[in-house]
Amino acid sequence: MNRISQLVARIFLGQIFLISGLLKISGYEGTQGYMDAMGVPGMLLPLVIALEVLGGLAIVLGWQTKLASMILAAFTLVAAVIFHNNISDQIQMIMFMKNIAITGGLMLLVVHGAGAYSVDSRRIKS
């Protein structure tokens, strides 16, 4: 059950980033405008998309899990502070706390690794 739980947890965490990155492609102009409005240069959007898609895939596959989790945890905390800092707005407070919770899950991956059903575990055995 532990092995399956680790895999499911990675899929749940990774899919958030993967889907978010892919949706940013289809809503590119709107996302770029939102970033600009929040004081983040919209020209960084391709890097954000690459980070979310590649980082999400890395987490799901369990490849370079500790590194990908560290990077995504830092990214998620920064995003919380920049984009969800109006905690007097209940929705923004929930979004901020969601980011904190995701960061907590990523930190567990940093500490414990990807688990048995992962590319990382296969590389260790080889």
Image (spheres, helix red, strand yellow):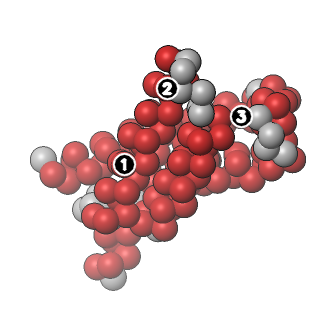
Q: Position of residue 100 (x, y in %)?
A: 43, 42
Mark toward the viewer: 2 or 3 = 2
> Is residue 28 among what the camera can see?
no
| 15 on left or right of 105 | right
Q: CA distance from mark 1 to mark 2?
A: 17 Å
- Which residue is drawn at the image coordinates 48% and 62% (left, top)? 70
Q: Earlier in the sequence, mark 3 or mark 1?
A: 3
Q: Earlier in the sequence, mark 1 or mark 2?
A: 2
> Is residue 112 among what the camera can see?
yes
Q: Which residue is mark 1?
A: 104
Q: Which residue is mark 3?
A: 24
Kindly state the secondary structure of the residue where label 3 is placed.
Answer: helix
In this view, 30 is above or below 38: above
Q: Earlier in the sequence, mark 2 or mark 3?
A: 3
Quarter the C terminus occupies: bottom left
| Amino acid marked by disc 1 | Gly
Q: Which residue is mark 2?
A: 93
Nearer to me, 95 or 10 = 95
Q: Position of residue 111 (x, y in %)?
A: 31, 65
| Amino acid marked by disc 2 | Met
| Amino acid marked by disc 3 | Lys
| Farthest residue, direction bottom | 126
| 89 on left or right of 28 | left
Q: Position of residue 81 (x, y in %)?
A: 59, 42
| Farthest residue, direction front | 88
Badge 3 crowding class, 10 Å Cα cut-off, few under 14, some 14 to 19, many 20 or more, is: some
Q: CA distance from mark 2 to mark 3?
A: 22 Å
In this view, 40 is above or below 27: below
Kindly state the secondary structure of the residue where label 2 is placed.
Answer: helix
| 80 on left or right of 11 | right
- Which residue is drawn at the image coordinates 77% and 34% (left, top)? 38
Q: CA distance from mark 3 to mark 1?
A: 24 Å
